[in-house]
Image: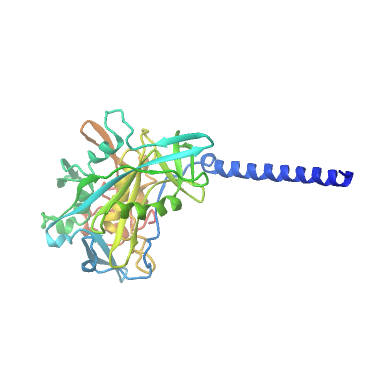
Amino acid sequence: MSPDLRYFRLLSALVLLACTTVIATAQANDEMKVSNEPPQARFTTMPPRLRTDIAVPAASSLPLTTWNGSFTHAGRTYRYNMVGTAPSANTNTTIPVYIIPVKIVVTNGTTKTTFNPTHILSNGNTVIQNTVDSPLFDSTTTYTQHGVDVGTTQYIDAFQRANFWGTVKTHTNSHLHLGGPTVTAEQTLSPPAQYGKTGKAFGFTAGLVDINWFDAQLPTIISNLGIAPHAFPIFLTYDVYLTENNQCCIGGYHSAEGSLSAPQSYAQASYVDHVGAFSQDVSALSHEIGEWADDPLVVNINGNNTPCGILENGDPLVGKPNYGAYRYVLHGFIYNLQDLVTLPYFGAPPSTTVNDWLSFQGESLSVCSNGS
């Protein structure tokens, strides 16, 4: 071999080694981005896989039982589409709910870390059973808001009754109930390395999964399980946060997909088994169900916005103590349930709601004071 050729090969090897080192370092840094940056507690709404330039749909055109309403603020009328039937109808609507447990398997080299909703909690229940037993589905808790009994019922129904108490107080049969829920077979998702990692978040090791990758898996699961658009599927994860652009931490989201004539609403929420952490027990799920109830198809966008933007009733309160959650004891377990802003927060007349409150728990707020 000539000296020139040996020199060329040596130089090539050095360049290759340098490039490999840079790439490896970049990959390592990329994997570290999520866990090294301070975690931010947040929720999001995925853009629906529907046309988003449409007007708020007519309730009569949808398989999911919904109703249309409106309010006027500063001389402008804002329309919305909510789950259930109008409070003035004085009827009880029950929406079938499916809980889809999702086991997340994160692979790092030869190490696999599993985050499984079948995990047994300190009270002897699985994450799944503790969710089913929560005030979101149990109807035995009485909700008294500053002396006003809005009902012995499920948490989201109590919120909606308080939300429209100006009507419900004389239409006492108005309810929005979550049926079941039916727990489906567990689904397993194993994100590729670039979409799934583990990292420290809020003081514990969590699974960190890219939200766009995760969301892309869901339509197939919904279809395979035979869930129809009149029902509400909930994807339940355990000790997992979703990430977006390598930024942690999303506790849950809701969206819709399918055809305009039969859109399928759905949500994801993580159950976190660490006291005081973001998304503790069913707090994230209560947040997402509350927002789904007020805008199931995510249509308050592109000109359909409220004065505050999109109609997300949990987001304005995440910055409050305990991430906006209030504690309720049921079956000997302390559940954390997200406070939710009422329609007057978005500009509706205060008389719409119980005690003229702008949140279910009576937080001191003004119209759009904490954004959307």
Residue 119, quarter of picture: top left
Q: Out of 322 and 94, give the one closest to the viewer.
A: 94
Q: Is residue 58 above or below residue 44?
A: below
Q: How many marks?
A: 0
Residue 90, quarter of picture: bottom left
Residue displayed at 51% across by 51% down: 245
Q: Looking at the rendering, in which quadrant would you find the C terminus?
A: bottom left
Please say whether residue 254 is visible from this viewpoint: no
Q: Looking at the rendering, in which quadrant would you find the N terminus?
A: top right
Q: Out of 289 and 21, give the one closest to the viewer.
A: 21
Residue 133 image point, x, y percent: 22, 38
Residue furthest out toward the front? 1
Residue furthest out toward the right? 3
Please say whether residue 16 is visible from this viewpoint: yes
Residue 223 as seen in the image, left or right of residue 36: left
Q: Out of 146 and 51, give the one closest to the viewer.
A: 51
Q: Out of 285 and 104, give the one closest to the viewer.
A: 104
Residue 16 image point, x, y percent: 72, 45
Residue displayed at 25% across by 32% down: 333
Q: Is residue 222 above or below residue 323?
A: below
- Scheme by which the image is coloured: rainbow
Residue 350, quarter of picture: bottom left
Residue 126 image point, x, y percent: 29, 34
Residue 37 as seen in the image, left or right of residue 165: right
